[in-house]
Amino acid sequence: MNRDAVEIFHEALRAVDPRAAVARHAERIRAIRRDEGLKDIVVVGFGKAACPMTRALLDEMGESVRGGVVVTKYGHCEGGLPAGPIELVEAGHPVPDENSVAGAGKAVGLIGQAGRESLVVCLISGGGSALFVSPMEGLSLDDKQEMTRILLRGGADIMELNTVRKHLSRVKAGRLAEAAWPARVVSLILSDVIGDPVDFIASGPTAPDTTTWAEALDIVTRYDKAGEMPQRIMRILRDGAGGKILDTPKEGNPVFDRVENLVIGSNRIATEAARLKALAMGYEPVVLTTALQGEAREAARWLYRQVLESQSCLASGRRRVCLIAGGETTVTVRGRGLGGRNTEMALAFALAIEGTSGITFLSAGTDGTDGPTDAAGALADGQTVPGARSLGLNAQAFLDDNDSYRFFEQAGGLFKTGPTGTNVMDLQVILVE
C-alpha cells in the first residue's frame, strides 16, 4: 500500500508538469504576438517551477526571446538554463534573501525598457512571493524577512501572509504590471493557492488587487503580532489603513488593459489525476476536497473521520478505497523541533490510527519541500507509532515539540522526492482496505 500511495502521488505530479502546461499554452502566446503585431518577447519568471516553465517556453519560441530574468529557489534549476538571453538568479525561500531583491530589481529594470510593441511573458509559480522581492520605500530586506518569519510561526495561512506582503512591495499586487506598462503582458500561472485566485498566487504581481491596507493591518493585529513586528512595518501599515498611502492597483486601473492572466496548472488537476490513477489500480477513489486548510494536526483528525466513514462502506462490500485531498494547511509553532505541515499532519494521523491495520497515509508537498526541510512529507500507517515506541520514541512528545521531521527520520517514513519542478500545494493520499 505504501508503494501504491507513492505511485498515485507521482501520477498527480505528472499531470501538473510545468513544461507540458506551458507547451499547451504556447499557441495562445503566438496568436497574441501575431494578431497584435508585437515584436520581441521579454521573459520574467519567478517561483519554484520557474526553470522548467522557462525551458518549455524557450523550446517553443526561443528564437523570439530578446531577454529575460528568472528567479527560483536554490537547487531548483538543476543543469541551469540554456545559454542565451535569459539570466538565472537563485534565491531564498520561504524567507527571502538578498538575491530575491537583486533578481526582482533586474527584472523590473528589464521590463522597464519594454515598449508598446513588446510582449512580456511572466512565468509565475508558487514560492514567488518570497523569491521575487522589492521592499517599498522605507523598508529593508531585514524588515521583510522578520515579518515573514513572525507570520509563518504565528500560523498565518498563505492568503493572510500574502495580503500583508502585497502592501509592503513594489512588485506585488499588480505593481509588476504597472512597471511593464504599456507593454503587452501575458502571465502563465501555476497555482499554489486554494481556489486559484490570481491576485494571491505569488502575491498577484500582474493582477488587480482585491485586498486593502485595513485588511493587512487587521491580520497582524488578529494574530497579536503588532508588538513583535518591525516598527517601520507597523507605521506603514497604520499609515496605509489611515489613508495616508495610496492603495495597490485595483480592477479598472488602465495598467491592466493589456494584461492577461492564465492559470495553467492547479491542485484540482493534480487530485483528478490521482483519482484516475487510483481507479486504474483497483481502488474506489474519492476526492474529499481540494481546499484542505487550517492547522495540520486538526486536518489530520478530520481526515481520520473520513477514514472511519469509508470503513463502513468497505464493510458493505465495496472495493479498496483511496481517499484524496489537496490544499495547504498551516502549523502554529510552539515547540523547538524541526518539521513542516505535511510531516506534522502525518504524525498526528499516525497517532490517530495507532495499532490499526489496513490504513496507509501519505501527505506531501507537490514541490518536494515541506517547510524548512529536505523532505516532501511522510508516510504513516497503524504500526508507525508502536514501531517508534519500540525504539524508545514518544510520538506525542515529538508532535508537542513540532518535531515531526526528526520523528520520521528516526522511526522511518520520511518521503523525499527532491525538487519536483512543480508546485500546486499539498496532496494527501489515504488507502484503506
Image: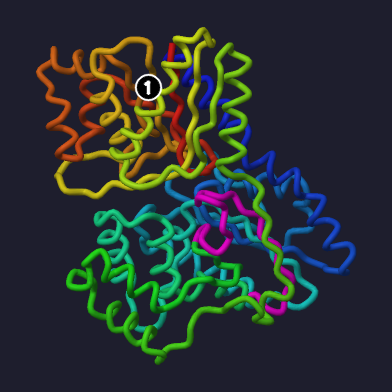
Q: Residue furthest top?
A: 317
Above or below, comparing residue 379 to residue 179 in the picture? above
Residue labelled with disc 1: 308
406 or 96, nearer to the observer: 406
Q: Residue at x 61, y 18 (%)?
A: 279
Q: Residue at x 68, y 75 (%)?
A: 256
Residue 179 at least partly seen: no
129 or 355, nearer to the observer: 355
Compared across the picture, whether 337 is left or right of 221 comes to left
Above or below, comparing residue 253 to residue 378 in the picture? below
> Magenta segment range?
180-202
* Quadrant of the rendered image containing residue 266: top right
Colour scheme of this structure image? Answer: rainbow
Position in image of residue 182 (x %, y %): 71, 79
| Quadrant location of the N terminus in the rendered image | top left
Inspect the image, locate mark 1, and give the three-letter code of the amino acid beneath it: Leu
* Quadrant of the rendered image containing residue 108: bottom right
Residue 180 at least partly seen: yes
Q: Residue furthest bottom?
A: 244
Compared across the picture, whether 14 is left or right of 132 comes to right
Position in image of residue 232 (x %, y %): 27, 80
Count of marks overlaid on the render: 1
Based on the picture, tell me whether residue 272 belongs to the magenta stretch.
no
Above or below, comparing residue 79 to residue 251 in the picture? above
Q: Residue at x 63, y 76 (%)?
A: 251
Position in image of residue 231 (x %, y %): 23, 79
User: What is the secondary structure assignment of the residue under circle 1?
Assistant: helix
Position in image of residue 107 (x %, y %): 56, 67
Based on the picture, tell me whether residue 186 belongs to the magenta stretch.
yes
Label 1: few (<14), some or many (≥20) within 10 Å?
few
